[in-house]
Amino acid sequence: MITYTDTVLKLFDRNGDGKLQFSELAKLLPVKENFLCRPVFKNANRLTTDDIDRVFSLYDRDNNGNIEDEELCGFLKDLMELVEEDYDEEDLLECKEILLEKCDLNHDGKINKKELAMVLMSYNRNPTSDEPDLNEESG
């Protein structure tokens, strides 16, 4: 068992702290693809109503017209993977608090389709070190 634990830590403990962060643990679990990582979301101003409907139906598992509770946690996890390599439960709670404060227009603690559209449309991906910054002058 110790050998197995050491092997798992060597493979997935990216920051070498001897513990698995939430983001590291997520790599172990067999989950569906993070829909928010698809190329269409790299340029949010090109999102169509169909794109937003697909994302909403993916996360609104019980089809009650809202993303809430565990559905919201799943959405936040996928959202966090877009902006942070390592995150933990505290980061997810902070993200949830900010998301609900800024985007939950009717203050019901849930995200409806209109509110989700606002989140997705406001998402603006910053260039990473691998992506050129088109605003920089060359030379």
Image (spheres, rainbow, N blue to C red):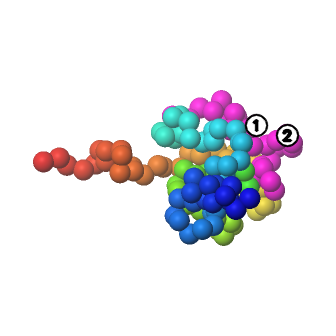
Give the numbered dot on residue 98: none
Q: Which residue is mark 2?
A: 63
Residue hosting label 1: 57
Q: For residue 21, say whether it is visible.
A: yes
User: How many C-alpha atoms fall within 10 Å of the one at disc 1: few (<14), some, or many (≥20)?
Assistant: some
Circle 1/circle 2 CB separation < 8 Å: yes
Tell me which residue sits at (56%, 69%) in the image: 17
Local secondary structure at mark 2 = loop
Dot 2: few (<14), some (14–19), or many (≥20) neighbours within 10 Å?
Answer: few
Q: Residue at x 79, y 43 (%)?
A: 60
Q: Is residue 51 above or below residue 37?
A: above
Give left or right: position of 83 versus 138: right
Instruction: Judge by depth and name the residue closer to the eye, 137 or 6.
Output: 6
Left or right of 126 in this view: 62: right
**Residue 116 position within the rendered picture, expressed as x and y whole percent measured from the top left:** 67, 47
Earlier sequence position, callout 1 versus callout 2: 1
* Residue type at the position of mark 1: Ser
Cα separation between marks 1 and 2: 7 Å
Amino acid at pointer 2: Asn
Quadrant occupied by the N terminus: bottom right
Over which residues does the magenta segment extend?
46-72
Residue 80 seen in the figure: no
Residue at point 71%, 42% (across, down):
31
